[in-house]
Amino acid sequence: MTRRVITSIIGVILTAIMLFPLYWMVNVSLTQPQNLRKDPPDLFPVDPTFAGYERVLTDQLPYLGTSLVIGIGSVLLTLAVSAPAAFALAKLRPRGRTVIDFVLLIAQMIPGIIMAMGFYLIFYNWGILNTIPGLILADSTLAVPFGVLIFTAFMAGIPDELMNAAKIDGAGPWRTFRSVILPVSRNSIVTVSLFTFLWAWSDFIFASTLNRGGDLQPITIGIYRYIGNNTQDWNAIMATAVVASIPAAILLVIAQRYVAAGVTAGAVKD
Amino acid sequence: MGIAPEHEGSAGVPTPALPSDQARKRHKRRAQLTAWAFLAPVVIYLVLFYAYPLYRNLDLSLRDYTLRSFIDGTAPFVWFDNYVEVLTSATFVPALINTAIFTFGSIAVQFAIGLALAVFFFRKFPLSSTLRALFLVPWLLPLLVSASIWAWMLNSESGIVNAGLEAIGLSQVNWLTSPQWSLISVLIANIWIGIPFNLVILYSGLQNIPTDIYEAASLDGANGWQTFWRITFPLLRPVAAITILLGLVYTLKVFDIIWIMTRGGPGDSSTTFAIWSYRLGFGGGSPDLSPAAAVGNLLIILAFIFGLIYIRAQRRMERS
């Protein structure tokens, strides 16, 4: 009994060490500007200020809105492309499925900077450089292979009897997919949406290459600009960082088990 | 029912094999068509948003692309000039070494810490699952946020890390601004970000080891250390291999952290291939897109080699 308690205490200490940078982010975000350069720095927000957060709300709200739109757009596009494909791969036994599997695997290994350069030229020609649809297209490439992988793994586990029952009731493949497979796959839809949203929300490389001059820029660019222009105002930078982390925190609390499922099933992150 | 199938026996003479064979074939072809109809969106998507950008990038690396090329649409084909330029550049050797140190250093340390934590959390104790979930948070944060936090924590004058070093009587370090420390700084941040991933994957690997093996071991009088090296570690090897190879492929691509913290500097001291490519293409005033694409393609060759190893390892794991 006491050994278990000691183990718990060690666990708490380890977690505290791991999460210290996050605590520090919150602490700095509440620090008065004149105390930022204090040496040694205050370990607690002794005289907290919310000025940093006020600046976030005045300066960064449009960036946050843009990120929200891009995140939701990427989720919708990723689901629309990956779910039907996974249904085919898991249940319809198409010839050549190994080729698709292989291509999806390779696709996850392509560094973002290479995709960014190709997209730059293509988006320039298509006239969607510096636009939200352009970024939605680019960001969805982070998630589509992952989405197909997760959906395929999940749908392969759906019993064939369920499909056969639908067939006997006269449902075609599309009806079966929509009315049987999709509702049953709710958990994997949550997992894929969660990761797609977080990746799109966190994307910096596509935003900074494909949306350098756009009017509507995502929050990562907002923070980046802050860092570039205000090397003094680290409390405002950290306040923005706190706000930019909120979606991740909320999603972790609400969807904890989906997160763990996504990491282990997909085992991919970029 | 109204349409008579072509090959029906004419006068009611039973011809059993042929029609059913034909019907089965037709049925099969229809099933294939249906399957590919569901696959069509992803195939179109892969061609348009993976294959085509990669082709454009390859083409870009074999031409001399300038700002004017955007306007008049011409860029002379120069064969491998950009690759020669890149391979003979003064940045090539440092970038190669930095990429190697950054990649292998990150993976070795985050794997070791991740494994130790996975073994630790595998013991049953109160709060275990809650704490494990909290360990995931750094992994879900935008990389840019993590990089900003570390940039401030490692700040020379006002950073908490230097304050801590001073408090225990050590001398302060110019983490981000001195050539000998900048790569270590970005390594520290990247290791921190990679720990949760290693923890989760290795933890799930531990869960898949049957418990009766442990019971047998403890009956045979094996101590904790022996159990780990003789049982846990060998049985975890396939999962460990996947974790490390995914780590390789992922770490090769790391860009945000280094760019935010040091921009690859000072000088080339923390420049990796990914940073170099970005800096050539988008980092400064005049974009050198063609050499940037050449650097990127060198990176992709590296990633591809590791990718092939990964696929082989995964096949072997599926078989076992």
Image: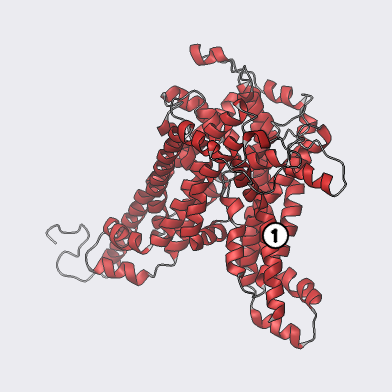
**Residue bearing mark 1:** B114
**Residue B85 location (% of width, % of height):** 73, 22
Residue A86 visible here: yes
Query: Residue at the spot x=41%, y=59% of the render?
Result: A93
- The extreme front residue here reads A47
Q: Amino acid at mark 1?
A: Gly
* Quadrant where the N terminus of chain B is found in the figure: bottom left
The residue lying toward the viewer, choosing from A158 and B13, is: A158
- Dot 1, crowdedness within 10 Å: few (<14), some or many (≥20)? many
Query: Residue at the spot x=70%, y=56% of the render?
Result: A17
Q: Is residue B184 left or right of residue A184?
A: right
**Residue A5 location (% of width, % of height):** 68, 75
Q: Quadrant of residue B217?
A: bottom right
Q: Is residue A204 left or right of residue A163?
A: right
* Residue B179 versus residue B188 in the image, above or below: above
The residue lying toward the viewer, choosing from A30 and A127, is: A30
Q: Is residue B1 left or right of residue B219?
A: left
* Quadrant where the C terminus of chain B is found in the figure: bottom right
The residue lying toward the viewer, choosing from A152 and B127, is: B127
Query: Residue at the spot x=74%, y=69% of the render?
Result: B234
Residue B238 visible here: no
**Which element is circle 1 on?**
helix
- The extreme left residue here reads B2
